[in-house]
Amino acid sequence: MMKNADLTSRTKQVALTTPTGFLAFGFGSGLAPKAPGTFGTLAAIPLYLLMMGLSWPYYLLMLVVTFVAGVYICEQASKNLGVHDHGGIVWDEFVGFWLTMFLIPWHWQWLLLGFVLFRFFDIIKPFPIKWLDQHVKGGFGIMIDDVIAGLYAWLILYLIVSYY
């Protein structure tokens, strides 16, 4: 088992020097010493702002591609670290947040509410999110719990936007 200082050094090395680590750690946002998932979600916002103009079929394709790529990216980063689902791996937060914002019209309040809802479900982990987080391993396991959190957040946000 690695000592904490060794793991910190190894984490920075993987996150900053390997392509899969750089993506998995959200371009470095996952290296935040506190709340890396929140910082990862914040780092996903500028990319969302670039993608939000896509038509829904292209946006959906982007979600599928980034999910499938995320399974590989997160798996490789985990293997390189020797730690399953390291807290700094935040590519899953990127995809979960982007899913939360699917078909949501642009307005800063919807963006803020989407952020809060996604973080809420990602942190609280209602069924089956917690079960998936604990029982499904590998890159798919890292990704799927955040995708379900994103679906929960999306459903609530979509209903609020639809009836507002």
Image (cartoon, rainbow, N blue to C red):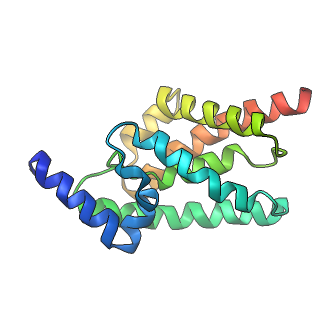
Q: Image quadrant of residue 134? A: top left
Please tell me which residue is depicted at 48% across the width and 39% down the height of the picture: 38
Position in image of residue 100 (x %, y %): 68, 43
Position in image of residue 106 (x %, y %): 82, 46
Vertical relation: 29 (above or below) 161: below
Left or right of 159, for residue 115: left
The one of 158 and 109 positioned closer to us in this rendering: 109
> Is the C terminus in the top left, top right, bottom left or bottom right quadrant?
top right
Which residue is farthest right?
163
Left or right of 25, for residue 40: right
Vertical relation: 65 (above or below) 1: below
Q: Image quadrant of residue 21? A: bottom left
Please tell me which residue is depicted at 40% across the width and 43% down the height of the picture: 36
The one of 105 and 75 positioned closer to us in this rendering: 105
Position in image of residue 12 (x %, y %): 26, 60
Please tell me which residue is depicted at 33% across the width and 67% down the height of the picture: 16
The one of 152 and 81 positioned closer to us in this rendering: 81
Position in image of residue 43 (x %, y %): 54, 51
Count the labels in the image.
0
Please tell me which residue is depicted at 45% across the width and 32% down the height of the picture: 130
Vertical relation: 100 (above or below) 125: below
